[in-house]
Image (cartoon, rainbow, N blue to C red):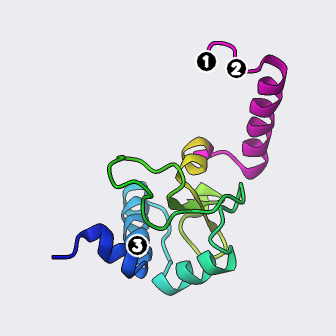
Amino acid sequence: MTSWRDRCLTYPNIMFGRAVKNAKLRALKKNIEFELTKEYVINLFESQGGLCYYSGIKMNIVKSDPDNMIDPFKMTIDCINPDKGYVEGNIVWCTYCINAMKQKMSKERLVSVCESVVNHSKKYGNIGI
């Protein structure tokens, strides 16, 4: 019998359908607009070249390591402006780690925070690690 992971690796469109379903559930829970289709999110992913909108990092459609609960580079849907909801023109694909960090920040604020991390790291190195 084929595992779920193997089916998703063979038929990655399964994961796009799942992403749309999960986004719809989040929209209902948050009482925000939802107008996405599987076709739209697939086309958006392809137009981004499979790269995170914010970082340019290649995203994984399926978790890279099935034994890990979270894959920081797994694809996720992000609302550019969370108040506008999941509508065409307001969503992008990004890595899980970037989406988790961004939360409700604007792109500009996210970039500012990332620049602060880089600057701090350059100044202090790996102190305490």
Q: Is residue 105 magenta?
A: yes
Residue on which the image places disc 3: 15
| Quadrant of the snapshot with the C terminus | top right
Circles 1, 2 touching at the beta carbon (< 8 Å): yes
Q: How far apart, in angstroms, are the residues tagged by discs 1 and 3?
A: 36 Å
Residue 81 in the image: state x and y as whole percent.
Answer: 65, 58
Disc 1 secondary structure class: loop
Disc 2 secondary structure class: loop
Predominant secondary structure, magenta span: helix
| Above or below, comparing residue 54 to residue 38 in the picture | above
Q: Badge 3: how crowded within 10 Å, few (<14), some, or many (20+)?
A: some
Q: Quadrant of residue 79?
A: bottom right
Residue 17 in the image: state x and y as whole percent.
Answer: 40, 77
* Residue at the image point whose x is 83% and y is 26% from the top: 122
Magenta span of residues: 102-129
Residue on which the image places disc 1: 129
Name the amino acid, label 3.
Answer: Met
Name the amino acid, label 1.
Answer: Ile
Name the amino acid, label 2.
Answer: Asn
Residue 33 in the image: state x and y as whole percent.
Answer: 50, 68
Q: Earlier in the sequence, mark 1 or mark 3?
A: 3
